[in-house]
Image (cartoon, coloured by chain):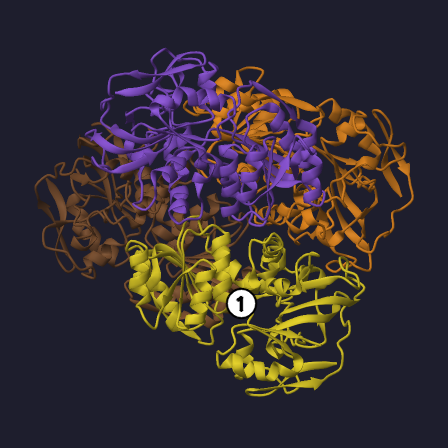
Chain colours: A purple, B yellow, C brown, D orange
């Protein structure tokens, strides 16, 4: 089959590779009908993630049709249209039993290399999905592939951060970064009852989109986000800040934007080892901080329901639809921030 | 001053009565700028509530301007524009300390007669509000009187029911009764993340309004609500049912509409002593049932924030605006269900 | 194998029946090392449950050793010592996905007849447990069979009721009925932080045991429980009442014992169709009521942890240990309330 | 009156100072019947807190009898025996309205100098308590002064950390530091349902006390706490870690002790500006971190109920009872860690 494979730093290509097959009895193989390029794929592209070898298939977002099921798969049959978590979970270990599927030691991340379970990717014609009963969900008939694909990663990542924040309806949420995850955070905050949502970014187009989705935009290139947020909140600061960039600078900004007693939720995938945490300031401000990889399996039923009911429209962020042949170019343009969100149509 | 007073069963009138004054040190007297007629006022009108005497001032919804403050009032000064709970709470007793302001033994209900604290009403030029620090809230500048008045009763009653239900975003909420409280429940369910909201009523105009506010309407005169709700939910039933009528028949309907494991929240003010509770059916369905008077003081900050942020527009239900002189007619028309919601403009 | 079977109303016997085998791929067959007679078995014994046929194997509490596993069982192997829920759940349907395993339409109740899934019972040398991955748990080494067996029903039933009540540490819990479930409710309330626990019963021995487990005993034969509870709580009533008897009279007593804003949790298995629900009184008291079958799969990890850590000792209620041959007599003595809790040792 | 006053770094003395009087209408003056020296007083003693002047009265723990009440005090009268929060809260501002009394901008900390509201201290014969209705609680008759005093700071600080952690009953809690706050954390974790509690310290006597209170002791001088905790938890780590020391080294240890998905709650009062936060490790572990000053007003009713019901005995940590004359020596011995907890008896 044809697939997008890693070759070297900043080099990916379309390559013919063997089709995946069921290996473990809980596997499913899907024919991929839609994939996507994720912001976190850029870490792979730039060679910042160890454990990539030439020829490795990339991609972890997907919608597809079940092709083959392992003998222990109970809930799916060939022909089912499915989407699922970018991070499969076994459903049977301690963390899974207590609902922390993102911490499953038996899972990993699809298409993210040897350090993350050595699972194949989804930017391909076919993909093997382990632990299918836990990882996959059938897509309701009237939900399109383009809507469904976001529930497997970007939307549910953002949604989970808002959920973990313990948002009280009526509160103000500031989102740092109006890329795909940030824009999903804007929508998630709205649907969970935020009063005002504020989006901070540097790119006017992204801020316009954030505004259309219901946020008050702040262009950090033109205004000081801290003084703007304080002024918008009567001097208090935001109740919740979602950091959707992934840098320590933006995380530290989050501590400045948040009100006393507030919560900082970092969902950007950082590549820095440590953060100069404002300990004394947090002591008096009583701030809660959490950074972690999304618990998609826990939350995907909620996001899928909300999409099915028309409460969230994740497709608002789609800027490009690429056949496999154009995906290598897509990676480059995405790295140059000329693409907001590219879907991949394996055809 | 002029006020609407009870005279006899189904007879209210505009009458000159003495202006209220500060009696207790925690009192405030407000000049009423907006009042309203509430569905629960009809119980008084029809003589179903004991403890009414001729000349008693009615009304418990209000926005006004602080005129006089008692010596123990700490948060308000003359000139403040305020709204507040229909059921004042002392803020200092056991139930208030644990946040159950609706159970304060020192409060009562404004304009609801001797059995409810013998507090004067708000369908008048002036009103005395006890326990002002706990009961009242300043209205933000850009929130209108017509928006604010709903946070003191109708909106917050509905909102509290949805909140008490433990709604999980994405769930389906069925609302029985599309009167003012029911329509606020539709909006509250939406803002707290409901996937689908279903409204059941008999009056086409109310159902149209429910639909405009985001609900799927079911006319119980034309279709069986139980089979319709089951069909809309794939045979499961609604996750949450809000009963906003107040009869045992509609409460029993709620038990038929709710799915196994669901929750029935009754906010209609019933006048019946007992209910033939479906015990065995609930045992196997694991249904939670709650009926109670709204905890407005607990929730008014949330609803006021949501109105201020434009997330809820309670004025959608306003059908009439009446000067005091027309209020007696208004009671009659409201009792005949020819009015959806009448505001009262004291001068 | 030898097993306890139903023969006719109030007649059970030891009978030779065929050994169960794996039928479905998610089944496990266990060699039963410990079973028990449950209060709810008396409904079967007295012929109050439809769907029993002569020769049907009774019993739904169990500890055992895995003997045979179906091909889709992922978490267990022969030799594992296990206990599990009396009500197996498939783990894959809608209710299971949202954590309401007690409402699984594919499960049932072990040993409870044709109306409850026609599953065989555990008062036998061997038993078939469906949906083993979801239903069963390995028993930690230092937890005895006698401790573990309670986590599959009686303890977790009581514990779940306390959990569902939303108990705030420091609150007062009244338990009506000091049988096995009631005594587990006493312990569960304590471990979840109840300030004072009150136990109401008629039998002095049960009340003595309740007192030893930390409760204030009230003998309803000697004192009016309502006035006693009110006096113990400064006139307020209990924050939470757990009804562990199963009659409408005791449920109505619960409404009298509970404080305004309190919660009534009924876990006794009722056999009455309806309850004359105190609607008007609940409206002003704002009481929450819930009756339902226990969600053991949801809570068994918590109770097993608490037993393993020595925080709860369920064996305090064990009064008899019977070999199979004595179980028919045991049913009779239990029905006469001469037994508090009888364990069954199959060989 | 006589009081303990700050003089210079590491110099306090008994001094005659003017008796406090009611200044603001919400004030109460109490005759102090019991005070204490707190670990956080050592920061003052060592001169690490700016804003202390010679002659300033120290102390923020207290039980007393109401002597004089301001005209806006509604819930207290002279003669009431009271205890209360070390950090008074106005009860009327935004943070107080949403229950975050520890963030009240109008409060401060009693006896903690000019930077914390310039409020007088309680190591004195009399003390002025601002915002008395919000800050104080009547002590139930059968609760002793020595029990009650802990609810105003040390116990409730620890209890709040356990509560904020979202502890699920059955989970394992590790407490770093077995001083007074740590030992209260051990008891709080137990009462809120912890399965196992582990205490880490260097001082054998403190560890013995921790063990008596139900903890598994780890002497960090004799064993590696990380490997011990991992081994006690089957390699997982603790679900919750309460850091009760106040140093960055112990906070970093907490990150090593906590399991993936766990929560680190820091309650030790730190004097360091920043922490080298393990960002990347936390990303993959999904750890939640919170540091903050205790919300005593929010939680004191719970802790007082638990003490009244005999569920927590905070007096277990009392090692010394000092008249005012011996308090200067007490500070010295406490700084040398020769005192675990000293109460102060003003006369």
Residue at figure coordinates x 83%, y 40% from the top left: D118
Quarter of the picture containing the N terminus of chain B is: bottom right
Residue A54 position within the rendered picture, expressed as x and y whole percent measured from the top left: 36, 11
Compared with residue B85, is residue A315 higher up or lower down, i.e. above or below? above
Q: Quadrant of residue A10?
A: top left
The picture quadrant where one finds residue C70 is top left
Mark 1 Cα-neighbour bin, 10 Å: few <14, some 14–19, many ≥20: many
Q: Residue at x 25, y 59 (%)?
A: C336
Q: Nearer the viewer, residue C102 or A76?
A: A76
Q: Front-most of A67 and A248?
A: A67
Find residue A274 and report its horizontal and vertical position in percent.
58, 19
Q: Which residue is label 1 attached to?
A: B317
Q: Is residue A185 left or right of residue C66?
A: right
Q: Position of residue C33 (x, y in %)?
A: 22, 36
Q: Quadrant of the C terminus of chain B?
A: bottom right
Q: Nearer the viewer, residue A191 or B45?
A: A191
D94 vs B316, left or right, is right
């Amino acid at each position: 089959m044809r697939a997008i494979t890693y070759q070297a730093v900043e080099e990916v290509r379309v390559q013919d590779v063997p089709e995946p097959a069921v290996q473990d009895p809980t596997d499913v193989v899907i024919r991929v009908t839609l994939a996507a390029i994720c912001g976190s794929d850029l870490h792979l592209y730039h060679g910042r993630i160890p454990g990539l070898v030439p020829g490795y298939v990339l991609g972890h977002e997907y919608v597809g049709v079940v092709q083959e099921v392992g003998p222990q798969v109970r809930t799916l049959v060939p022909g089912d249209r499915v989407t699922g978590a970018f991070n499969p979970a076994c459903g049977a270990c301690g963390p899974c039993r207590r609902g922390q599927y993102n911490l499953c030691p038996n899972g990993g991340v699809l298409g993210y290399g040897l350090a993350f379970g050595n699972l194949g990717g989804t930017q391909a014609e076919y993909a093997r999905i382990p632990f299918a009963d836990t990882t996959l969900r059938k897509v309701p008939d009237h939900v399109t592939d383009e809507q469904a694909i976001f529930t497997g990663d970007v939307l549910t990542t953002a949604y989970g951060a808002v959920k973990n924040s313990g948002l009280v309806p009526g509160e103000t949420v500031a989102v740092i970064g109006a890329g795909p995850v940030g824009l999903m955070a804007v929508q998630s905050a709205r649907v969970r009852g935020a009063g005002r949502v504020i989006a901070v970014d540097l790119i006017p187009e992204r801020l316009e989109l954030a505004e259309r989705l219901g946020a008050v935009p702040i262009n950090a290139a033109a205004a000081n986000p801290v003084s703007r947020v304080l002024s918008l909140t009567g001097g208090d600061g935001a109740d919740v800040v979602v950091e959707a960039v992934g840098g320590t600078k933006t995380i530290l900004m989050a501590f400045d934007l948040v009100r006393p007693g507030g919560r900082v939720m970092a969902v950007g995938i950082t590549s820095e080892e440590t953060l100069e945490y404002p300990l004394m300031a947090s002591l008096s401000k009583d701030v809660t901080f959490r950074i972690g990889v999304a618990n998609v399996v826990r939350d995907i039923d909620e996001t899928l329901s909300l999409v099915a009911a028309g409460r969230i429209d994740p497709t608002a962020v789609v800027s490009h639809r690429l056949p496999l042949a154009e995906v290598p170019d897509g990676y480059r343009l995405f790295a140059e921030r000329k693409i907001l969100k590219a879907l991949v149509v394996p055809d």
